[in-house]
Image (cartoon, grey):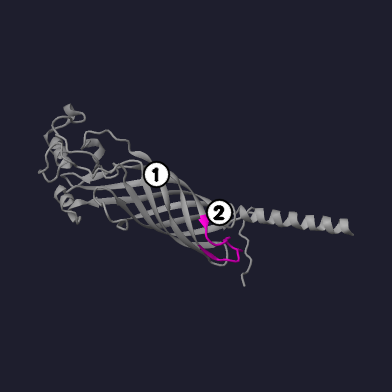
């Protein structure tokens, strides 16, 4: 009898462990969308200035009720306009940019409450996340004909900078399970970018006549266009500061998320919550 009870207890323990492992390996697939913004030379002080949009896909692997890893792929538009800035020097510069950002990132998540989609007893949790990512960007401005063109082609600071970089994403969120496979959430995240050229602004003002990319192919109009992109105000002195001295730009996202849980069996498990 003692041996039978011991074996039965062991079997129950193994079954509970297997069940828990199966539940801890649930996958979620979803969408995110919301507002985006940026901090840099044209927005040096406001970490909540969200003036454009973002849309993305996400895949989450729930490792346990408290830990998960998530892959993101998203597009975020960023823009900055010195003319509307509260800083007098930034307004005088009259610089402007728009840049799409395409990001892929991998982050770890920590749930403050034990959380499982579909069958967890706790149906909501705040969480923290952090990880690493990579992104591509392309700062643009309007030319004299009103067309968006790539500022990198004009090399406004004489720098052939790369248009891809690493980033460190981090932030906070809150999610709520809708008594089944569906979970909704909100999230505020920041990305420290390992580049200072998201806005095409970093160093000093240069003489636009000294070095022109493909000079023998530039006509007078293109040269004038480059001079304008370098200094729209036509008031700044060569060698004076164009950037703000900081070496990293930042972009931020405020998003709403919707995810759907898929389990090992290939379909959602729904256990009614009391």
Q: Position of residue 38 (x, y in %)?
A: 31, 51
Q: Which mark is residue 268?
A: none
Query: In front here: 169 or 45?
Result: 45
Q: Magenta residues, as a range?
A: 110-125
Q: Main secondary structure of the magenta part?
A: loop
Q: Residue at x 55, y 54 (%)?
A: 67
Percent across and percent down for residue 176 are 51, 65
Q: Is residue 198 above or below residue 118?
A: above
Q: Position of residue 155 (x, y in %)?
A: 22, 35
Say above or below: 248 vs 1: above
User: How far is the residue under mark 1 from the one under mark 2?
Assistant: 22 Å
Q: Quadrant of residue 218?
A: top left
Q: Quadrant of the C terminus?
A: bottom right
Q: Earlier in the sequence, mark 1 or mark 2?
A: 2
Q: Secondary structure at mark 2?
A: strand
Membership of 111 in magenta stretch: yes
Asked whether 1 or 134 is in front, the reply is 1
Question: In the rendered image, which quarter contains the N terminus?
Answer: bottom right
Task: Tell which of 135 and 147 is nearer to you.
Answer: 135
Report helix, strand or loop for mark 1: strand
Mark 2 sits on what residue? 67
**Magenta highlight on residue 63:** no
Total marks shown come to 2
The residue that appears at 57% across and 67% down in the rendered structure is 179
Q: Which mark is residue 167?
A: 1
**Which residue: 44% across, 57% down?**
172
Query: Residue 250, percent across and down?
Result: 33, 48
């Amino acid at each position: 009898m003692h041996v039978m009870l011991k074996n039965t207890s062991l079997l129950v323990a193994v079954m509970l462990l297997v069940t828990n492992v199966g539940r801890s390996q649930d996958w979620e697939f979803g969408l995110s969308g919301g507002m985006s913004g940026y901090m840099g030379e044209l927005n040096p002080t406001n970490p909540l200035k969200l003036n454009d949009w973002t849309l993305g896909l996400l895949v989450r692997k729930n490792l346990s009720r408290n830990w998960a890893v998530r892959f993101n792929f998203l597009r975020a538009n960023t823009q900055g306009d010195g003319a509307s800035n509260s800083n007098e020097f930034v307004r005088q510069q009259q610089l402007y940019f728009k840049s799409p950002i395409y990001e892929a990132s991998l982050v770890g998540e920590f749930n403050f409450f034990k959380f499982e989609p579909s069958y967890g007893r706790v149906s909501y949790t705040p969480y923290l996340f952090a990880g690493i990512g990579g992104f591509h960007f392309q700062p643009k401005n309007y030319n004299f004909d009103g067309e968006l063109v790539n500022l990198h082609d004009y090399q406004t600071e004489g720098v052939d900078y790369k248009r891809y970089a690493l980033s460190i994403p981090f932030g906070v969120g809150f999610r709520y399970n809708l008594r089944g496979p569906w979970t909704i959430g909100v999230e505020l995240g920041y990305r420290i970018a390992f580049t200072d050229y998201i806005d095409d602004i970093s160093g000093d003002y240069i003489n636009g006549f000294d070095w022109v990319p493909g000079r023998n192919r530039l006509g007078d109009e293109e040269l004038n266009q480059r001079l304008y992109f370098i200094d729209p105000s036509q008031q700044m002195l060569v060698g004076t500061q164009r950037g703000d001295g900081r070496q990293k730009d930042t972009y931020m996202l405020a998003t709403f998320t919707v995810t759907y849980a898929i389990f090992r069996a290939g379909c959602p498990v729904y256990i009614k919550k009391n």
